[in-house]
Each structure stands twice: as structure tokens, then as C-alpha cells.
Image (cartoon, grey):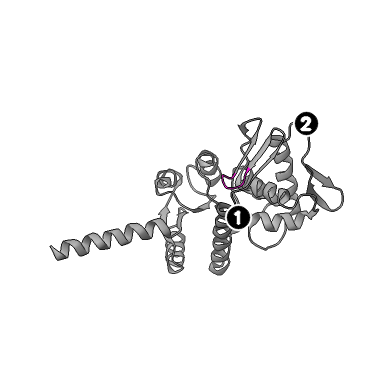
Amino acid sequence: MLQGLRMKEKIKIVEQKEHTVKKILAVDDEAGIRSLLKESLEMEGYLVYTAKNGMEAMESLKYQPDLIIMDINMPGMDGYTVCEKIRDYVDCPILFLTARTEEQDRVNGFKSGGDDYIIKPFGMEEMLARVGAHLRREERRQQNSNVYVNGELAVDFSGHQVLVEGEDAGLTKTEFSIVELLITHSGQVFEKEQIYEKARGFDGEADPSIIAEHVRRIRQKMDKGKHHIETVWGVGYKWVD
């Protein structure tokens, strides 16, 4: 009887841990990389699930991960395709692993709904820093319950959602981060490099062309006759109420 009670207590502790520990899904077709990610992230206290292809990744969404690390170059369904398929149902940050270094490849990653990219081969210290930065940013966002309303535009910071005329504008997480940054500092001009670093949640080599693409897509999705994000030529962007 006592042994049975102790077992129930252990099960209860495990269940509580799974509810409090951050869950990460690592997707890569290389067993060595999956093993490295799982071991290193678990040493940092994360609960880690792994998948070796796109189909397994989609099945693993039942674990409700707080962050996804996804390889792009997988056989069958690549990382871009997986991200596009799940983005309407998954709100957590998605970090791409890629050996591709061309600017267009990075742009495609953000277009498909990714939030960050890490170039292979990668250093585990950088990987852990980026994972931690994205998770902290998510926690800060969840603590912010403010709602911004301007005419037909409504931004729910806690719900991570932008509504235009009552309809979801369909912003990606990175696009929302840009909108959130500019709204909460309305009237302040941000250089593209600043926006790039803050939106990614990790200081690194800036890529202004990607921010220009994000702003173009935000305007396309969100603006109905009025540009809330104003271009300050030669400098960057600012929010206009």
C-alpha cells in the first residue's frame, strides 16, 4: 500500500514538472544532431522531444512545445513546408537550423513563419543563448495584458494577435514582435539594425534587408488605407498613431 502511494506521488511530481518545465521539440534528420540537442538542452533543465522528419514533427505537436528547433534540409517535407503547415496552429517560436547562407534562404525562412535561424555548424553556447532569449521574450509577452486599439486596428499583446476590422491579420511571430516593439515605443525611430536584433530576441549580425521585407509584409496584411509604420528615410521606421 505504502509503495503504491509513493509511486502515485512520483507520477504526480513528474506530471507537475512537465507542466512547469519548458518543452522543446528538436527536429532533424541527423541522429547525431538530435542526440546533441537533446542532451545539451536537457542539461539546461528543458524537457526535450525529438523528431527525425516533418511528419514526426507534426505528430509531436501534441506535446505543445514552448519552442521548436527545426532543420530545413530534411528529406520529403522540408522545414519551410512544415513551418507553413503548422504556423496557424502553433504560436511558439520556431528556430531554423540551416547550412544555407544566402540572403534569400533566410528571407524564405521568415516568410514561412520562422522566428530565427542558426547556421550549421553551430556552437551549442550560441544555441542555448538563442533558445533562452526567445523563451524569456515569450514570458515577457505573456505577462503583458495590454490591448492597443486604433480605429479598426486592435493589437492584443497577451494573445499575440493583430485584428483588422475584426479579422486576424495573420502576422507571424517575428512580424508581431516588430509591431509590438514599435507600438510600445510610438513615435520613436528605430534603425533597421535595432529592430532586427530586438525582433529576433538575440543580439547578432544585423540584416536590414530582412526587416524591410518584414515591414512590407506587415503593411500588406495590416494597413487598410493608413500606414501605421512610417519610413524615416535613411534611418529606419517608427509607429504613427
Q: Is residue 183 left or right of residue 13?
A: right
Residue 34 lies in what quarter of the image? bottom left
Q: Is residue 159 magenta?
A: yes
Q: Position of residue 177 (x, y in %)?
A: 65, 50
User: In what element is the residue under mark 2?
Assistant: loop
User: In what element is the residue under mark 1?
Assistant: strand
Which mark is on residue 99? none
- Front residue (pair 214, 55): 214
Q: Is residue 216 magenta?
A: no
Q: Position of residue 238 (x, y in %)?
A: 79, 49
Determine the residue positioned at 48% across, 53% down: 66
- Front residue (pair 103, 64): 64
Q: Which residue is mark 2?
A: 225
**Separation of disc 1 and disc 2 at Cα?**
33 Å
Is residue 98 at least partly visible in the picture?
A: no
- Front residue (pair 126, 135): 135
Task: Please report the bounds of the magenta region as a residue range.
Answer: 156-160
- Front residue (pair 211, 108): 211
The number of discs equals 2
